[in-house]
Image: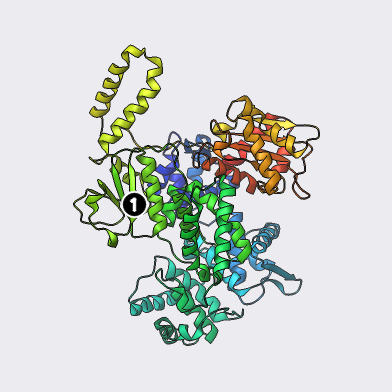
Amino acid sequence: MNARCRQLVQVLIQQTDYMPVNQLAEALGVSRRTVYYDMDKVNIWLDQAKLEPLEIVREKGVFLPVSGRGQIDQLLEADKQQIYIFSPEERAKIIICYFAYVPENVYLEQLTECFEVSRNTILTDLKEVTRLLAIYDLQLEYQPKTGYRLVGDTVRIRALFMLYYNEFYELFQSGVIRFWKKEETQGYLEKLRILETALGIKYVDGVLESIAALIPLLYLHYRQVSFKGLKEEEIIRSKEYALVLRYFPDLAPEEQLYLTLHLLGSRVNLVPEEFFESESNTEVYDLTKTLISEFERTACVVFDDPEELERALFVHLNTSMYRYRFGIQLGNQLCDNIMQEYPDLFAITKQAVRSWEKQTGIPVPDSEIAYLSLHFGGFLKIADAESDHLRILIVCVNGISTGNMIRREVQKLLPFAEIVDVVAAVDLVNAQNFCDLIISTVKINSVVPVVTVHPVLTEFDRKAILNHRRVAPNRIVLQQKQLFQIVSKYVPKEHHQVLREDLMNYLQGNGTGSREYAAEEYDLLSLLDLSRIRICHGDYTWQSCVRESGRSLLANRSIERKYLDVIISQLQYYGPYMFLTDEILLAHAKPEDGVNCLDISLTVFETPPAFSENRKAKVVFLLAAEDQEKHLRILKDLLKLVDEEDFAQKLAGCATEEEIYTVVRQLLAET
């Protein structure tokens, strides 16, 4: 194991109970995503030592079984060389980087030596490599006497290389990847930093490291690259091109242009029209519509104001399309924060983007998905918002997507407040005329009180807003109303006034920091019990399939009968668009079509009903969403299950509802 995995184990050895992932991430000084990534590593190491794996329990955290701790101490002491253990996922993606990085064909023996695994293990990995490549219309070609090589579009190969390099940056830097020449890229990085200084700009952290990793592929120049719609004369006149000629004079002319293109494309404020033929507005508009439609379908929501979202998304995509076409991966300093604060929204956006990746053939990096998440999240409707006299202005310098997301988060946090507008700092004039409080991502001077927050709200930011002197009185009144509604049912009416006064006195006495903000969260297993799981035998039409799937929700009064009628009419009108795969249907309609409360059912059909020639519903999830947000974590869990290989077949092989529940629970625990 590497040093970080060893440290994770050593922290867990000291614990006598489950340790929440957030606390573990804080103790190790890494993100939640890194913790999950390292836990997979530790479990592989434990499995090889024939020890029990880490116990990972949702809502509780991680626990290292006590029975094996003594042996683990001995193994850690003996394993001082810290041999790194690659997971199957890592091997597959790094093998792709290997193929992209070397000009000659690669033999099976080279791969077994590089990763210190058997031939059979590598052959299994190559099946996953082939699957990953097929997503981007790339192929792995094999000839008995010459070995393996990548076949396909050069830009796609390079974009995939950069995607996986960024994903496993720490591994590449650690020296455990044997084919990687770190010293070579370090020299290129030093040149790029000199070039950055000469330009008088500052690239986002990680951008220059990624470009430095790409440069060895440019020097090999064994894959020809072409540029469609590029204004070469404009590129040649740029200061970046002149510096590339000075510091990389021995690159091929096409690669000098390509390197310049990456330097230009990594500037956030670049106007692409300077260097590219104008993109067809129709093409970008169609892509915008497709992305919104895919998000709505995946998230089971319908945006109330799709036109405004279309405009915002169109502007973003119109300035970014050329970056995707050439595999330029723009850094996003907010990416990790977005993934941590909005994991469900990010996961659903990533699923929605898959259709775009298929259309362009270029992988969309997490940094871009994070930007798109903010766009979509900013337009999700908030349920049950109230209005009062507290007027709040949002000031943001990071673009409309960030501003709209902050607006939405603040409205959730303070449902009694009115968000009057979202403006840029430079446009802030006479704020005292139309607001009582400013929430800003940049420090500003104003006669109106200001709460300065991060572009992606943290828990500290939320507490700062809740505890502000202009917010607290309104917040107490709202809490008093909410508590009274809950408690008054159990108190005689003649005591209601005294109850109101007592609640207000209690809250005023504990009005600062007594109650942390916490949004309701529901995962799949919190709702899906045995009463909501059914196995249906016999033959069903697709219409009766929908009705059978909704039977338990009707019995629970979670939905009205008309909700199933709407689902059937929509499938009849639009076709089988609700299918997640050819065999898995996620049936749903709008909250206003007959939803009483959030709920979900799971039905397995022994004889799958046909919805079309290619779509037969072996598994049906029927979702009742009461708003546009509470069900997002449930959908995140569903997407994990659907991504599991042969998931529908695994459920179809179960003889009882109990077995189905066990399969779902085990798969979610593994992920």
Outermost residue toward the right in this view: 539
At which x and y percent is residue 560?
60, 30
Q: Which amino acid does label 1 sit on?
A: Asp
Q: Is 430 situated left or right of 565 in this image?
A: left
Q: In which quarter of the image is residue 115?
A: bottom right
At which x and y percent is residue 526?
54, 32
Q: Is 524 situated left or right of 519 in this image?
A: right
At which x and y percent is residue 117?
64, 58
Q: Is residue 594 depicted above or below 429 in this figure?
A: above
Q: Which of 69 and 114 is in front in this view?
A: 114
Q: Quadrant of residue 228?
A: bottom right
Name the residue tied to disc 1. 421
Outermost residue toward the left in this view: 447
Q: Nearer the viewer, residue 325 or 336?
A: 325
Residue 168 at least partly seen: no
Residue 70 at least partly seen: yes
Q: Residue at x 71, y 43 (%)?
A: 648
